[in-house]
Amino acid sequence: PVTIQALTCGCTLLLAGSVADVVGSRHTYLVGNFLQTLTSLACGLSRTGVQLIVFRAFAGIAASLCLTSAVSIINDAFVPGRGRNLAFAAMGGGQPVGFGLGLTLGGVLTSSIGWEWGFYLSAIINGLVFALSMWQLPEGVGKVENVTWKRLGEEIDWVGALIVSAALAMLSYVLAIVSTNSSGIHEPGNIALLTVALGLLVAFVSWMHRQEKLRKPALIPNSLWKDKVFSSICVNVFLVWGSFNAVEQFGNFFLQNIQELSALQAGIRLSPAIVTGILANILVGLLVHRIRADWIVILSLVLSWSSPLLMALIKPTATYWSFAFAAFLLNPIGADGLFTVSNLLITSRFPMQTQGLAGGVFQTTSQIGKSVGLALTTLVASDITAGSSSKDKEASPALMQGYRAAFWFLVAINSTSLCLSIWGLRRIGTVGRKQD
């Protein structure tokens, strides 16, 4: 139940974006929001694990409809300039706020009146957002004329969407298994799924080549990857969000397993990331049309690069304020600083009529990046811990060796992203400027 929502969301984002472009982003967003309300309520009413897993899976699909259509709505409602920049910044800033409040309220509700109320509260909030959206979202925003079943069949690359969705579903499943138990990578079933997923990704590239050659709808045309800026920003999103998520997870492991803090105590110590995440989005939204985008990205990455470095150097007995506070404070700056810039750059590479798909590209890249980053970091930590000289592999000395190696691995990931930004994004100038 913990990972199924992220899995179904991640593998349906591209398809959801394509659907939003054909039927209209406003309608897609409202349907997704309504489904979020129903599935949250259903999760709270679940009486078996199977029921909970099924409803969480549908909640992931509902979330993919909202995430992709929101990008299209922003691009349609705001002209290029400060308004659109701040809208993307607000969207990015909402993520750390939602994560922090959800984590805190979830813990409080679970330990007091019951876990069901976490879902009931989510249903209430989603219901209010649905009502507010019905009232406030103008009818003309994201509206598409003459929506027919024929258009749905002809203007969406269904074959490409199914191929890549199946590949991402298998890949995400294996990565989720590896993230919780690194030995799962050796299971024959997981090896088979991983092999099939990689084969489907190759098939997807071939299908994109065919669609472009025949001038038919292509989900992500191969020609886009020839654009150095587009390729660089996508790889950056993949690497940076992967590192951000892994630093947060392994920072939590360090606090709980090495310094023996409770989950609540660890959550409180991780909370500075929420503040910096919000501030990073606001600052980028205000400055992105005034300062060169490559400078913003590089500065953000330099600051977040320091986060895993501090955790790699930390001692098990170190006080929170000496290393961990600064590490958790700096960690989200790269990911959240990149959010507005990357959305503006990626959407600018897609036609206005496919902005939902553009949003799907960003969201898919970040989702898969988080899964791959956490899985690879887990493998590094587990391998070093298993090879330590300590007899008890569950003891702090053995775990600390693995965690330290994991943080050094993340320093290398951030360094790669920084070098890629310097090479791939140089001289791109400012983005999000008002057009005459």
Image (spheres, grey):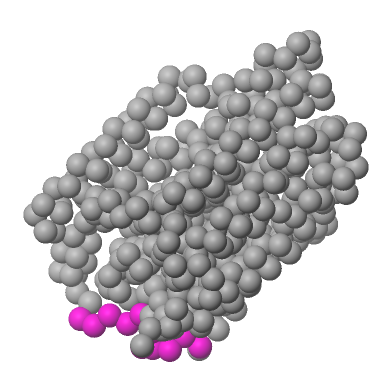
Residue 433: percent from the left, percent from the top?
Answer: 44, 78
Picture residue at 9% right of the left edge, 54% below the top: 214
- For residue 316, above or below residue 149: above
Residue 283 falls left or right of residue 158: right
Pick the residue in front: 243 or 176.
Answer: 243
**Residues shaded magenta:** 136-146
Please tell me in which quadrant of the rendered image residue 374 appears: top right
Can residue 180 be seen?
A: no
- For residue 397, above or below residue 219: above
- For residue 286, above or below residue 234: below
Can residue 426 be seen?
A: yes
Q: Is residue 84 magenta?
A: no
Please tell me in which quadrant of the rendered image residue 23 appears: bottom left
Main SS of the magenta segment? loop
Residue 43 falls left or right of residue 12: right
Residue at the front extreme, as displayed:
427
